[in-house]
Amino acid sequence: MNVTIQRGATSGVLAGLILGLLFFVDYGPGDSLLKSAGWFGLSHSAGAKWFGFLILIVLGGLFGGLFGVLQRNRPVELGRSLLVGLATGLTWWLIVTLLIGTGINHIKLDLGGFLYSFIMLLLYGTLLGSFFFQRSTM
Amino acid sequence: MSRPSSTQNSGTSTASMVAQVQETSRAPITLGESSLLLIALVRIFVGYLWFQQLFWKLPPTFGGLHTFVAREVGGAFIPGYGTIVQNVLLPNFGLLGTFTFIMELLISVSLMFGLFSRVGAILATVMALQLYVGLSNTEWYWTYGMLVLLGVALLPLPTGRRLGIDQWLAPRLQTMTSHSRIARLLSWFV
């Protein structure tokens, strides 16, 4: 596998792991993890919180790989890494939260639902771009 | 009478050692990469703490905020503060709710994304101080004290320069400081 794609995927896993930890720090604990499980209609299944945690890491890695593809054969620059990272987070939100979660699994996207998923996935994008830059330049 | 040269040498070396120790103890501290990453993570989690508190005070009703503002009427430890809350803030609750929501959203975005992270730390400290004055008597005293200290702890550190947008902003603002007063001001906040 191309080293840039590999670096993107591992940066994505790291960003997804931090997202999972943030989703865990909640009343419950980990009630927010039900939101990520809910994107695939699994918020009521046994072990839904674990599934929600796993989804964030797996999707983090997958979208990180996609980020790596977009960064391939280009010089590593922090500005571009952050921008492409934010675009990757936005893509995750559009495909998984909006299309699959709301469109297919009928999750209600009110102001709270929108704010939570949108900001958190943009944060994923920032972390992804940042980790990728750190790992490429260190 | 002169002292033996070995005693003189020993005196000189002790003095230079003391001077060296003093100089070293005053030298600026440079944080290592792992320390910078750790404080960046702390910044993100503190930002998330504020972010989570938005969801029980969402517009247009601002949910549970009214209960806490009303509690400040009897709970504030500064004389007259409760009267201001009762006669000025509660009658204009819509405005207060909007202001609180926007401030906390700004704190969250600033700290989570490392975007002018010192602005986020200042706003977090001010908001937490208000909670400390109004509510610390009504709950475990240190709850809001710790919230104040979390904001203060993030204030002197450039926490957004790792895992944050400030890492991109800081050098650009720095190069503009010589010919732009705004850049000079903004560069303090990254």
Image (cartoon, coloured by chain):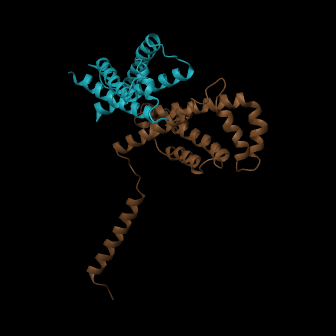
Chain colours: A cyan, B brown
Vertical comparison of A56 with B32: above or below: above
Q: Which of B108 and B13 is in front in this view?
A: B108
Name the residue: 45% across, 33% down. B166
Does residue B117 appear left or right of residue B81 in this picture?
left
The answer to whether residue A61 is visible is: yes
Where B6 falls versus B60 (above or below)? Answer: below
Percent x, y of residue B162: 40, 36
Depth order, front residue of B106/A74: B106
Residue located 42% across and 37% down the image = B161
User: Which residue is depicted at the point 49% across and 39% down?
Assistant: B46
Q: In this view, does B104 lie to the left or right of B69?
A: left
Tell whether B74 sits left or right of B11.
right
Residue B177 point in image, percent of width and height: 50, 35
Which residue of the protein is positioned furthest toward the bottom in this rendering? B1
- The spot of residue B59 in percent (x, y) is 63, 24
- Residues B4 and A7: in front is A7
Seen as rendered, the residue at the extreme front is A46
Percent x, y for residue B1? 33, 89
B167 versus A80 height, above or below: below
Q: Is residue B180 visible?
A: no
Image mark count: 0
Q: In which quarter of the image is residue A87?
A: top left
Residue extending farthest to the left is A1
